[in-house]
């Protein structure tokens, strides 16, 4: 069983930046995609960004131009760099891994890290 552990969340002012990290407990197959999701209070979980094993990426329209997803296969880690943060980015952010890049059905999930953006 793979465990995913997110870190890097916190309280930041609007306009600021954060870098989220997600470390896997063991080697994630390089064939697996990885992704970041978020869930704001009272809202559905939504995809923020995803990356394939080849480095192909996709982003939610709401974060395009402000977010960058990347992965370090050697260290079993995926990152999410978020810039120009807005109060509406406030949410619990979750890391996912598996074969869900196209289907949205992921095999592994982390416990989440809270991001709060103050206005």
Image: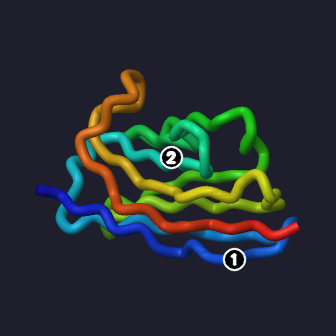
Residue linked to disc 1: 11
> Which quarter of the figure has residue 46?
top right
Q: Is residue 108 above or below residue 72?
A: above
Q: State how many labels appear.
A: 2
Q: What residue appears at the point 64 percent right and 62 percent down from the top-left corner?
A: 81
CB within 8 Å, label 1 to label 2: no
Q: Is residue 112 left or right of residue 46?
A: left
Residue 89 place in picture, x, y as percent: 71, 54
Mark before the other along the chain sequence, 1 or 2: 1
User: Looking at the image, which residue sits at the far front?
Assistant: 42
In which quadrant is the C terminus drawn?
bottom right
Q: What residue appears at the point 32 percent right and 69 percent down from the top-left corner?
A: 75
Q: Is residue 99 above or below residue 114?
A: above
Observer-nearest residue: 102 or 87?
87
> Which quarter of the figure has residue 54?
top left
For label 2, the SS is strand
Q: Is residue 35 above or below residue 22?
A: above
Residue linked to disc 2: 37
Q: Is residue 75 left or right of residue 41?
A: left
Q: Is residue 64 left or right of residue 10?
A: right
Observer-nearest residue: 50 or 91?
91
């Amino acid at each position: 069983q793979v465990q995913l552990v997110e870190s890097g969340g916190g309280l930041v002012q609007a306009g600021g930046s954060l870098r989220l990290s997600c470390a896997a407990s063991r080697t994630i197959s390089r064939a697996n995609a990885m992704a970041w999701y978020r869930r704001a209070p009272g809202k559905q979980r939504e995809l923020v960004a995803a990356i394939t094993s080849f480095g192909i990426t996709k982003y939610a329209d709401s974060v395009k131009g402000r977010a960058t997803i990347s992965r370090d296969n050697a260290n079993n880690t995926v990152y999410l760099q978020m810039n120009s943060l807005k109060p509406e980015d406030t949410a619990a952010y979750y890391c996912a891994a598996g074969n869900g890049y196209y289907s949205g059905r992921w095999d592994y999930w982390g416990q989440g890290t809270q991001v709060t953006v103050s206005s």
